[in-house]
Amino acid sequence: MCKVNIVKKVSIIGIIFNAFLLIIKLSVGYLSKSQSMLADALHSIEDAISSILSYIGARVSAIPNDFTHPYGHGKAEYIFSFIISITMIIASFTMFKSSLYNIFVPQKIEFSFWLIIVCMINIIIKFILFLYTRKMYKLTKDILIKASMEDHRNDMFLTMSTLIGVTCGYFSIYIIDYVIGLAISLFILYIGLKLFVASYLVLIDTNLGCKQIDDIKMGFKDVSIFLELSEVIATPVGSKYLIILKVDIKEDNTLKKLDYEIKNIKTILKEKYKYIYDVIIEFNS
């Protein structure tokens, strides 16, 4: 199975199970008035939306390059990631406001053992999904699958917090439920801001980090004989980078020797650093 089909399969599975978890969390959370359960349900909405957008992003980014898009459509997944981050930030503010209000104007929580059962179902499903996506990520090293894997792992810890909150509700300690709802909304905000920044940096063509640039310089130095590197510029192409190397010729050499060295540099750098999409070498005037 090709990489794109694996990403789509992971996304579809995520959509199905997140929709199921959303329905049972909303139903039980609404009936019991549990803020932590409703916050957890809100996160399931984000998960379902993320899975849908990941599916669309995988399909669009897999469209082959053409005349108007010579480097393909890889940035599409970051556009969808940017949209996901905005929805997460808006949702977190809504949940934060609701939880904060209930701390000062508390409502009685109708405790039900269904709250406990839903939490346990969520933890079990998310643990299975985490193991599955981790296996698929090891197979493909795809950034969208990695995001899903981390999200499933985080969901397990979030639901464990929800479990604590609803258990405290059994002993009429309602404020714990509200505080945990508040904490979950802040966590969603943190994840949303983190995704926002990561997507934004790619969309504005941010250069590679200093360490990666230094690695490329060292890799270039190890294989170069006739060329001297003066500058490294990188621009994102999907989840990888197009690398532009500005070079000077050390001494007069035949075009045949220079052509061989350029091809050798490109091949070695692309094999050594998997985040490199392609290498362009420009000669300084």
Image (cartoon, helix red, strand yellow):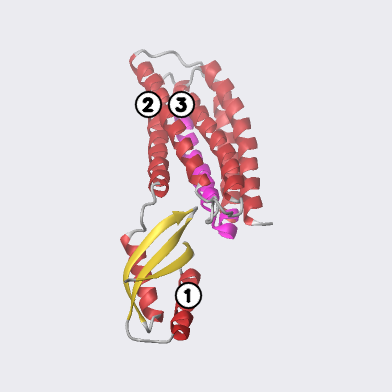
Which quadrant holds the C terminus? bottom left
Give the labeled residue for mark 2.
179
Q: CA distance from mark 2 to mark 1?
A: 53 Å
Q: Work out whether residue 175 or residue 224 is closer to the camera in this orientation and state it.
A: 224
Is residue 271 visible to the viewer in this orientation of the structure? yes
Circle 3 crowding by C-alpha within 10 Å: few under 14, some 14–19, many from 20: many
Q: Residue furthest right?
A: 1
Tell me the residue at 47%/27% (across/down): 39
Q: Earlier in the sequence, mark 3 or mark 1?
A: 3
- Above-or-below relation of 145 to 169: below
Q: Secondary structure at mark 2?
A: helix
Name the mark on residue 20: none
Range of magenta residues: 136-165
The x, y position of residue 71, in whole percent, is 52, 56
- The amino acid sitting under disc 3 is Ser
Name the mark on residue 268: 1
